[in-house]
Image (spheres, rainbow, N blue to C red):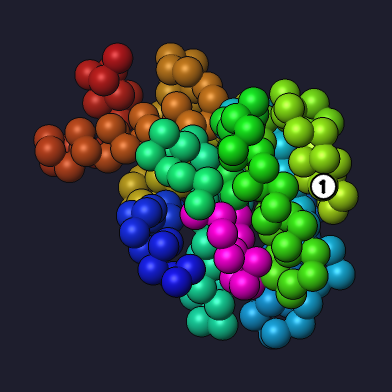
């Protein structure tokens, strides 16, 4: 039933979301913890900490890491994880959380999107409660720590903070430069440091916007059969 419900959501993991292509830099501890957690599940060993909460500003990599955890578990073949993107809450129902305590790995992204919604808050709280007596792992993300979310159900904030809570930190300029070139390389694109620095000077610098721009650059390069150069980038401004 759980697998059927997940398939009915028509939710796909990002093709490029993996631990290997996540530039940890300021977030090495949380990346290592997530990797160890998934490895334990794949060895059919229960991790000591079964609830993890990641928080940070937009562009810190929350979605990337949650999807990477799901993808890693999926590729290992031991478990069929469930990824719930609450940014799509308008087309989802709290009922999708029912019985997820029977799934080895459940990742719930953007918890802040349901703050103030009594049905969703109650459903999340009940999932946490059921999972306490189960053998699964819950990983949550939000734009703020559990105690700073605008939740109307105090018990939910308490439950979300019971496990390990990690703050994700933004990359600096050098990190952004490395990240966009690494993402380009993973797509089979050759982006020189000069071109990458031009992109950082001329376009929004948050990672979400930069990766969206890279999609446009890839399409423009393919359509025009041109290398990635500053003149090509200028045509996208």
- Residue projecting furthest to the left: 224
Q: Residue at x 39, y 68 (%)?
A: 4
Q: Residue at x 70, y 52 (%)?
A: 126
Foreground residue, 156 or 11? 156
Foreground residue, 92 or 13? 92
**Residue behind mark 1:** 159
Foreground residue, 153 or 87? 153
Q: Is residue 80 left or right of residue 155?
A: left
Question: Would you say residue 44 sits in the magenta stretch?
Answer: no
Few, some or many residues within 10 Å of mark 1 (<14, 14–19, 20+):
some
| 165 lies above or below 57 | below
Location of residue 14 in the rendering, given as x and y in whole percent from the top left corner: 42, 52
* Figure quadrant of the N terminus: bottom left
* Residue 6 seen by the camera: yes
Q: Residue at x 20, y 33 (%)?
A: 220
Q: Which residues are magenta?
A: 96-107
* Disc 1 secondary structure class: helix
Q: Quadrant of residue 209?
A: top left
Location of residue 86 in the rendering, given as x and y in whole percent from the top left corner: 52, 40
Tally of numbered discs? 1
Q: Quadrant of residue 150?
A: top right
* Residue 70 seen by the camera: no
* Figure quadrant of the C terminus: top left
Q: Is residue 77 left or right of residue 39?
A: left
């Amino acid at each position: 039933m759980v697998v059927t419900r997940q398939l009915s959501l028509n939710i796909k993991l990002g093709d490029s979301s993996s631990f290997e292509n996540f530039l940890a830099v300021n977030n090495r501890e949380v990346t290592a913890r997530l990797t160890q957690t998934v490895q334990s599940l794949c060895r059919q060993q229960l991790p000591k900490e079964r609830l993890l909460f990641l928080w940070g500003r937009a562009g810190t990599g929350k979605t990337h890491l949650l999807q990477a955890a799901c993808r890693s578990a999926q590729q290992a073949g031991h478990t069929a994880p469930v990824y719930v993107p609450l940014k799509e809450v308008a087309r989802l129902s709290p009922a999708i959380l029912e019985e997820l305590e029977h799934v080895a790995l459940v990742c719930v992204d953007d918890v802040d999107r349901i703050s103030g919604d009594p049905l969703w808050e109650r459903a999340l709280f009940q999932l946490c409660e059921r999972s306490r007596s189960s053998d699964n792992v819950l990983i949550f993300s939000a734009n703020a720590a559990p105690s700073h979310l605008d939740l109307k159900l105090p018990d939910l904030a308490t439950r979300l903070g019971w496990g390990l809570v990690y703050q994700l930190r933004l990359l600096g300029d050098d990190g952004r430069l490395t990240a966009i070139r690494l993402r380009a390389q993973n797509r089979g694109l050759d982006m020189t440091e000069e071109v990458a620095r031009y992109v950082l000077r001329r376009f929004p610098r948050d990672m979400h916007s930069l990766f969206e721009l890279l999609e446009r650059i890839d399409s423009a390069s393919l359509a025009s059969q041109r290398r990635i150069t500053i003149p090509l980038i200028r045509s996208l401004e």
